[in-house]
Image (tube, coloured by chain):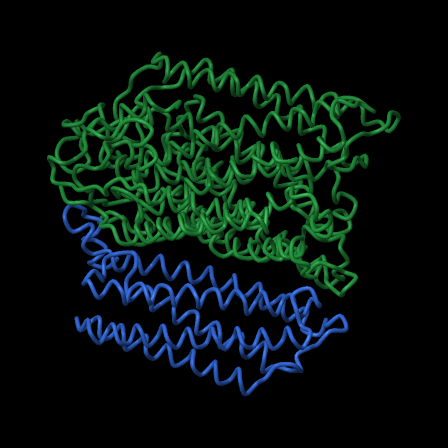
Amino acid sequence: MTTTAADQQIIRSPGQRGVWAWITTVDHKRIGLLYAVTAAAFFFIGGLEALLVRTQLFGPDLEVLSAAAYNQLFTMHGLTMVFLVVMPIAAAFTNYFLPILIGARDVAFPRLNAFSYWLFLLAGLLIYSSFLLGGAPDGAWVGYAPLSTQLTEVVRMDFWSIGLQLLGVASIASSANFIATVFTMRAPGMTMLRMPVFAWMSLVVAFLLIFSLPSVAIGLFQLFLDRNYGALFYASAAGGDPLLWQHLFWIFGHPEVYVLVLPAMGIVSEVLPTFARKPLFGYPFVVFAGAAIGFVGFGVWSHHMFTSGMGPLAEAGFGVATMIIAVPTGVKIFNWIGTLWGGKIKFNTPMLFSVAFIAMFTIGGLSGVTHAVVPSDTQQHDTYYVVAHFHYVLFGGAIFGYVSGVYYWFPKWTGRMLNETLGKIHFWLALIGFNLTFGPMHILGLNGMPRRTYRYPDGLGWANWNAVATIGAYIILLAFLVFAWNIVRSHFLAKGERVGNDPWDGRTLEWTIASPPPVHNFDEVPVVHSLDDFWHQKYAEDEEGRAVRMPAVTGGALTVDKKTGGEGDDDGEHLDIHMPSPSYYPALSALGIATLGAGLIYLPWGFFAVGIGGAIMLWGLFGWSLEPVTKEH
Amino acid sequence: MTDAAIDAAHGGHEEHHDVKPVRKTAMWVFLGSEFVFFGAMISTFLLYRNTTNGGPGSEIFDIPFTSASSFVLLMSSLTMVLAHNAFENKDMRQTRVWLVATAFLGATFLAGQIFEFTEFIHEGLTLPTSPFGSSFYMLTGFHGIHVAVGVMLLTAMAILSLSGRLYDDRGLNVELVGLYWHFVDIIWIVIFTVVYLLQV
């Protein structure tokens, strides 16, 4: 287990070490770290799949992979990156920092939080077990019917539909949890409009998931029934309409795009003010733009379907809605630029990644606006132009934002800094590799290269740019190996510089507590008086509005915690703070549901697994709802 | 922010004593999600309402019979309210009576649904008959599963109340199950109207 060192730093009380302590943990910080480590592992697996795909496309008529293997790899790459990397890394940040940023000691439902993690992990493992059980899903991550309903004798797409279903249950549970946390657990004085932008974006994302996931859940059930029980939802011969799948999928799928990117925007909105040493420009605009993206995001799904013949009225409507959603996004970009304007900018690694996020996301956003133009989109549909677009948004955008977050918050997680030189090498390799890989795909797409294509002949003018893209992909690998080494070196080899509570001269509540934080986060629940409260505790303004450091911060809730300073081994018992007790029921319930799901794939004889899984699930859920939250000592 | 929530945020002892608003918030959010879940199935049904693929269509519905079973289900919301009311008044015996009554009415509805499904299958409407059949069985089937889960929860609470272990600060409590139960009833009003009554 790679997180053992962090484990020992965070919790030292008896009975809290080892694997069992991690399985039964209900501490939002530990669950956040579990999400982070799991997402990192899947990131390297999903990256490897992309590298194999790129290697196959390096030159014309190559045969590095078989066509069947190629289909599985691009499907699993998309599935992995969306559901097993970007969503969980966002969940990692949200779990770890949402409660701290709003001044709470944990999320509203610590055990439900653990359940979400274990179900996510088991669903990921279930999907990946398909490689050993006859082949991975191969109908693309969007699983369009009727392709995904054919071939009923092969279970691959059942792994996909059941796996996504389980991931959806995990996400709904954690979203309800985060919403209840934000609405009911904020510290005194932490009004909604004093919450850090990252907390706001987590809230918007939770609402997006709550209202979008059920749509794809129904679609997945319908596909499953079509494939296994002869239902006719997508059978056009019987009058079924395969387009229904596309609607149900994209009503989820488009809000999902904002689910992936809004938390990254939240992180960038924390990083920029810290290193520009200025408050976020137009905070309410950034918040309301995020909320507006959430609302409008539900009204644009059909722009994924402009070539399906919806008719001019629907196409015009969805085209205009798509252009409208660019407005709040543009508002955010101008606010970020306004934040940087006139600031005393420190270009260290988190800042570099955040600035790169703005630039790359703007490019991706602009190519996105070209999709809103229906005649133009008809030409671009299912070409590499689309692949270029969404990688600029989700890699140059989302992933760069999350990497920025890792560099920014790593000292809070571990008490150690990441190395700046290695960080800058990582940054430049990633930026160059990324643009070499995905920049040329714009040209390839406009020259007509279809996406998900296994091979292409020579003489179409695609060979050179494909070679460039593949070289770029290997540079990205190099960049992230440097990143991995930086983390290993800093934390596991303990070579990172040790830091105190507030290494960046930060603005928000997490910098008021020890690094890593004690189990109960706050000895005394903070009382919040303004946005960026911690900053205002440290700085006053002179007549010209410049920040002037106040003599010394003493007294009040926001002082450095001397009892736990830098150690974080305090379980808070001496302060008479009772944190929720560890529980194995969440992991048990998740195991039951996952077993039940796995059984469904192999019905009828999988019925035994369904029965056993159902029984375990009931045991877990009833045990869970009947045990007290905090056991008496 | 309510006083209760401020108390909860203040932590310490109060934290795990006043969890009711927190749990209710999450329950409402979950039910919001459930509305989309059923909304997607109702949309599918509306799309395929007349796509009978040569099999039976909506003419096989027995409106008087389903009206009766719908009435039974709606009455169970009344008994649920009485159960919750008795629980708030700390009257465990009354609570138990009304919980059992609610579970019984729910089970009666389920029995009616099983009878109805059997009839339809005899008349040639199955899941693989037509998109109409697929969407009918999926929509009403998922609703039936929701009722069954509710009956299970109600029964479990009635049993727990015998040993005096029915608390209002645990996951399984009368108020939350009540919210869920009313939701299941409200969704049935929509399903009954859209599937059975709207024959345009």
Q: What is the x, y in percent for residue B17?
A: 18, 54
Q: What is the x, y in percent for residue A130?
A: 60, 36
User: What is the tally of numbered marks visible in this picture?
Assistant: 0
Q: Quadrant of the C terminus of chain A?
A: top left
- Nearest the viewer among A351 and A295 is A295
Location of residue B56 by image quarter: bottom right
Q: Label the green chain with its letter.
A: A
Query: Position of B95 compared to A562: left or right?
Result: right
- Nearest the viewer among A74 and A621 is A621
Residue drawn 20% across and 58% down? B4
Residue drawn 48% across and 25% down? A352
Query: Position of A129 compared to A615: left or right?
Result: right
Chain B colour? blue
Residue drawn 31% across and 30% down? A506
Location of residue A226 by image quarter: bottom right
Query: Position of B133 compared to A293: left or right?
Result: right
Query: Position of B93 compared to A465: left or right?
Result: left
- Residue lying farthest to the bottom in this orientation: B64
Q: What is the x, y in percent for residue B175?
A: 29, 66
- Position of A298 relative to A462 (above/below): below
- Nearest the viewer among A358 and A89 is A89
- Residue lying farthest to the right in this orientation: A459
Location of residue B99 by image quarter: bottom left
Q: Quadrant of the N terminus of chain A?
A: top left
Q: What is the x, y in percent for residue A355?
A: 50, 29
- Nearest the viewer among A155 and B45 is A155
